[in-house]
Image (cartoon, rainbow, N blue to C red):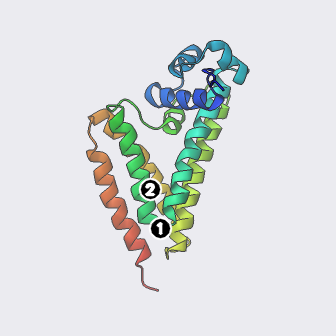
Amino acid sequence: MARSNAPSRERIVAGAADLISRRGLNATSIRELAKHAKAPLGSTYHFFPEGKQQLATEAVRYAGEAVARILRKELAAGPVAGLRAFLALWRGIVVESDFRAGCPVLAVSVEEPPADEIPPALVAAAEAFEEWEHLLAQALRAHGADSDQAPGLAALIVASVEGAIAMCRAKRSTDPLDQVAQQLEVLIVGALDRPA
């Protein structure tokens, strides 16, 4: 049976996440999102009849869940292993794109929303960050970190890594990720080795 060349919904979403990670949302049209995913505009509107905001929201959810899957898997070995996997993921994206791509969740988060409106893509971004923080805090607690300290440390990890991604793109260097990785590992080990 011959395989169809028609673009899948997931391929369009993945392509949109990639383009948003490079250009942001406000600077990208649905036509450009479709073209980047190598999908006809008609197929894109078929899957996303509400247009650009619907596609962007799905792209942010897709990216958020992809990161959460990696965290769930790697955090089973402990918070340091989870951190290393989180950093390796972003290092790969930044380096493979020649410092052109970052995090689509961050890209949507830093753009000005329309007046008097919280767009669904921004809500999806907040949910993605919350899920990553929750997974990290849960692993920190499970491996001996203070229950009250774990959420703050998890937020610090996500904020530091996301900020380092932006710095890597600006500096065209992975040094910010390396520096952040070193400091976060020290903090995590310190949180886990606290006296009983």
Between 86 and 7, which is closer to the camera in this rendering?
7
Between 66 and 122, which is closer to the camera in this rendering?
66
Label 1 sits on residue: 77
Q: CA distance from mark 1 to mark 2?
A: 17 Å
The residue drawn where x is 56% and y is 59% is 135
Disc nearest the viewer among 1 and 2: 1
Q: Looking at the image, is 189 positioned above or below residue 163?
A: below
Q: Say what amino acid the circle numbered 2 marks.
A: Ile
Rendering quarter of residue 23: top left
Rendering quarter of residue 37: top right
- Say whether marks 1 and 2 touch (CB < 8 Å): no
Q: Say what amino acid the circle numbered 1 marks.
A: Ala
Residue 119 at x, y percent in the picture: 66, 31
Residue 134 at x, y percent in the picture: 58, 58
Task: Mark 2: give few (<14), some (14-19) or many (20+) Cα within 10 Å.
Answer: many
The residue drawn where x is 53% and y is 31% is 17
Does label 1 or label 2 sit earlier along the sequence?
1
Badge 1 marks a residue whose secondary structure is loop
Residue 97 at x, y percent in the picture: 36, 32
Q: Looking at the image, is 65 positioned above or below residue 147?
A: above
Label 2 sits on residue: 157
Badge 2 marks a residue whose secondary structure is helix
